[in-house]
Image (spheres, rainbow, N blue to C red):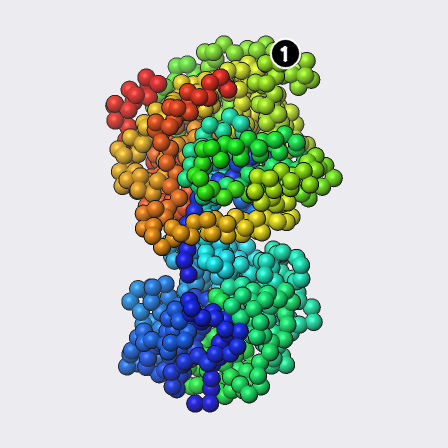
Amino acid sequence: MATMECKIVTLGEGRVGKTSLALKYVKNEFHKDEISTVNANYLTKLVQIPQGSVQLNIWDTAGQERFRAIASNYYRQAKGALIVYDITDRKSFDKVVSWIKELKSQAEKNIVIVVAGNKCDMEKERQINRPEALEFCRKMQIRHFDTSAKSGNGVEEMFMELASQIFEANKGELGQSGRNSRRGKITVEKTKHRENSGKKGGCC
Amino acid sequence: MDEKIYCWGFLSDEKNSAEPIELKAIPHYEGLYINRRCKYIWSENCLYSWGDSLLEPPEVLLKTSEKIIKASYGINSPLVQTNLKPVLSGTFKDDISEVFGTSSGHAYLTKAMEVKSWDSGNTILSRIASVDAECCDFFALNLDGDVYKWAHIHIPKKIFIMEPIMTISCGAQHSVFTSSSEHVYVVGSNVYGQISIGDIQSTEHPILLEGITAKKVVCGGFHTVLLGKDNLLYSCGLGNMGQLINSNFSNINTLTLCTINEDLGEILDVYCSELTSFVRFSHKFDAGISSFRPGNLQKKNIIETFLHRQQVAAAERNYLQKVENEEKNRNEMIKKQLKREKRIQKALREFEINIIPNWSMVKFSKEVNEHVKNGIPSKFRGKIWALLVGNDNRVSEEDFKEGLKKAKRIEAQAITVEDKNILENSLKIISLDITRTFNNLGYFSEESPLNKDLQELLEAACIYRADIGYIQGMSYVAGCLLLNLDLIQAFQIFISIITSPILLPFYKIDQEGIQVREEIFTGLLKENIIELQEHFDLQGVQPAIFLMEWFVTLYSKTLSQEVALRVWDIYFYFGEITLFKTGIAILQLVSQELLEYDLSGIMDCLSHLAVYVKEPDELINQIDHVRIPETFVRQVHNL
């Protein structure tokens, strides 16, 4: 059966659980105080879905706002994006909107986006009303998942869904693309760089 | 021939079936080996394999004049044992008895019952009876009935199960174990109901399926088939191809009796490939050597028994040899340790009596140079760092207090709006990062007194140099300083580090500046290990990806504490060029591995460097030997 290799990125505010979700899924590990990500981590996992298999190359980016300018280096050429927010933190949900906007204008056209409302094991401290989140994602035509990297709830389902949506969206290319294009290369384009640093202005 | 094999499920790209389809076998076959990785059948002198279509007869893979005893999965070609040669296949190391693999690589089981990594040949586990793999995880069962699980380069972990296990079988993302009392344990994904635990999506701890006993259980990619003690078949999981042997194409989330026409005969054995189930009906059969021989199989013939005994004897010999070697290695380790301790004792005296009292005179002497390379004794480490760094920036205790006071005010929301926008974010992230710093060591946990120090240092620094602010990763540098110095001194050195010309752009995330430094690093890499630089280029690995973390944390997040502190010693002594040299030296130490890996392997290796770079002396020595041409020295100086 065909194997599709694809690059996906995790995006979202700091400490919402991007690394934890990726680690839980790829290695089934969970640390209460996951160390903060500097720049980005890289993880990879082969997902088998009934249609075939998908090699997910996950670039797990740093959440701090100041790393945001660099994040575009990672989501460029990505076939999928996982935007994470923390259900106990209103601000992190507001960030989701701006990430979706940025992806829709800057990323590949057919990028598959899913949204994860993480830390759903902390239901008591919830600040984002679930119907609100669902309605928002429905309007955007994006799948929403309630996840908990701690308990593992929803994590596998979410990555499976991401993998199968990516498979569907890209199956046209499967046969044709040669070996060269298989790799999820991350290329930091030099010219782009300068543009970014110009735009960034006085953020820091 | 009284025996027949039927299959259900995926048959070819065009056809699948929920009704039994007779598999076209070969007349008078001696053995059969079907699992998720391959489908082999053999006669006395000839090995066949079914191809992509199960509707076609199997094709010849190998002919030999010797008698084939067993065939199993090999990576590029089958692994075949004959009565004369242990292994009949060109590509193999000769002690192999089983090969198994995941998406990230392969491992193999030796005749000495050790599991070894395919790539490195390193021993992962010993006394192993049987092995299998999911798509991402390896599983092994040892002679005591313990099950171990690991992935790629990770260390195997024992899975806790209530009783000794006798057999293991792995699907794509789920596994099933049977115990000596024929109980069934399941673990992994239940997305299609493949582990029969109802609505629960998955489990990472094995669960006992109550009230079920089994002669044999096998996993397909996403389904499970169980041969009960009643000699009836049960199945669950993904049914889209008809693989659940029940004339149906739907998924089932509990083990359910299969519907098999009695005319097909008595069930002898069951196998699964990814999306297909196979059942062998009626009459005798022999399935080759296995350490655990299920009671439903016929006894081995004389030759086989003899060979098996030989193998066991060889295994015992190898095992004893290995124990002896381990003993020897341990003794050598102890010797090394003793030597190191002696060296430290000597250095301690030297620093106390000769070096510190005469610091300004001896600081650049050959002896001190040598001592720093050997590691500053931890007792004097902070003191020597402070002496080396000095305080050119004239950062005072007042600066610290002032910064901290303002930070507290901002937190209390008593300042102007602009200030708040810039700083509030940084301050918020600082408080999130404190307990996550060196989290595995617990130095900065909430109960620890250092917790408050770290927060205060970072907050004060963030205000004192508001033009730089805080970025994630800084907490490691501050943490490392606090472990060796008091708060004010740590603050002074921290400011000196984050404002140093080479590091400043990293802390400011000034992409242009970072790029210049990346280019220097790439140049040095080319100078020192050109083949690795070319390999990185080919694989699309840009040094910026890892350089950011290395430089921002001064390697303290990347390397183990012991090794990182030694790097810091020479960083403070020999200056900033050390940062570049250390990066190159690390890559030199792991270049053998890196050259073999593609992007994912490289990134995996680079994110586990602490595992690869364990010996501080080795790294320091390597750093000493990094070549830095004059032009680079000038470039670095001009930054």
Query: Residue reaching furthest right?
Result: A124
Give the residue drawn at x 42%, y 36%.
Answer: A76
- Is any part of residue B41 visible from this angle? yes
**Residue marked by disc 1:** B416
- Where is A35 relative to B322, above or below? above
In the displayed structure, B361 sits above or below A4; it is above
* Residue B356 appears in the rendering: no
Q: In the rendering, at what x and y percent does residue B443 appear?
A: 60, 33
Where residue B482 appears, as percent x and y from the top left, is: 56, 25
Q: Return the x and y of residue B100 as percentages of the image width and height.
A: 43, 63
How packed mark 1 is, by other alpha carbons closer than 10 Å (few <14, some 14-19, many 20 or more), is few
Residue B246 quadrant:
bottom right
Q: Amino acid at mark 1?
A: Thr
Q: Nearer the viewer, residue B6 or B611?
A: B6
Give the camera-side residue of B363 and A171. A171
Residue drawn where x is 29% and y is 78% of the image: B63
Q: Helix, strand or loop at disc 1? A: loop
Vertical comparison of B145 with A151: above or below: below
Place residue B87 in its image quadrant: bottom left
